Amino acid sequence: MDFIVELVDKYGLFIIFMLVMLEYACFPLPSELVLPFSGAVAASAGLSLIFIILLSTVAGYLGCLICYAIGRSGGVSIINKIKNKFPRSKSGLDKSEEIFLKYSTVSVAVGRVIPLCRTYISLIAGTFKQNLLKFSIYSLTGILAWNTFLISGGYLLADNWQIISESYNTYKIIVLLVLITVIVGVFVIFLIRKKRNKIKEITNNGKKK
């Protein structure tokens, strides 16, 4: 923890960008610490909250793309190699694969707020060759939601940013359930509207005939 704080204090925005990118690129860095502290740094430096959220979202997306590309080019064999070389990653990879196979596209968004799953979900999506456009849209949605939540907390509390980390650890399950509910809700509404538009289009075409 102290090491990360020291890095951010010394290198500012550059190290924030790199840390966020690495966290989304399968490196086990604690976003619960990095993101709130990024918000606090931005507030102290007089930077815009929107700016730091967008910066972190771009960094997160680039990290996801790295994992996606590795998974897509390496396939299942790369997953097995990682499991053999880093046994501790096995549970996270297995869980991410289980969630991806069960929920498919939506898992890429929802997985961003689930511990361990958010570390490996991009790798799994690449391995199963998920459509890049869908991967990008759902990833950006999940990243934006997660980053906005944590960075805003750090930004608003500024010097008291550590309270965010402590509160998160205390109410972790509640926070995750709320975020997952919101993200799933958004996509359910999107799918319902899409289905209605399709039915409407078919009905209109039928009337024309």
Image (tube, rainbow, N blue to C red):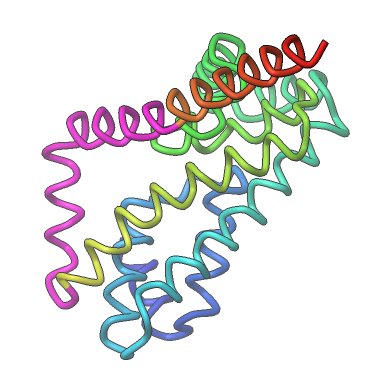
Q: Is residue 184 left or right of residue 101?
A: left
Residue 160 among those drawn in magenta: yes
Q: Which residue occupies the foreground of this view, 114 or 162?
A: 114
Indicate the position of residue 28 as horizontal and vertical percent values: 49, 45
Magenta segment, prevailing SS (helix, strand or loop): helix
Q: Specify the quadrant of the image occupied by residue 52.
A: bottom left
Q: Residue furthest front?
A: 208
Q: Is residue 179 above or below residue 46?
A: above
Q: Which residue occupies the foreground of this view, 17 or 180?
A: 180
In the rendered picture of this protein, how many numbered marks are placed on residues? 0
Q: Which residue occupies the foreground of this view, 114 or 198?
A: 198
Indicate the position of residue 130 as horizontal and vertical percent values: 75, 27
Name the residue: 24% across, 66% down: 154
Name the residue: 58% across, 25% down: 194
Which part of the image, by quadrant, shows the C terminus?
A: top right
Name the residue: 43% across, 27% down: 189
Q: Specify the quadrant of the image occupied by residue 69.
A: top right
Name the residue: 14% across, 51% down: 166
Residue 180 among those drawn in magenta: yes
Q: Residue furthest bottom?
A: 46
Magenta range:
158-186
Indicate the position of residue 62 as horizontal and vertical percent values: 67, 56
Q: Is residue 6 above or below residue 117?
A: below
Indicate the position of residue 1 as horizontal and vertical percent values: 31, 60
Q: Is residue 95 left or right of residue 207?
A: left
Q: Is residue 21 left or right of residue 179?
A: right
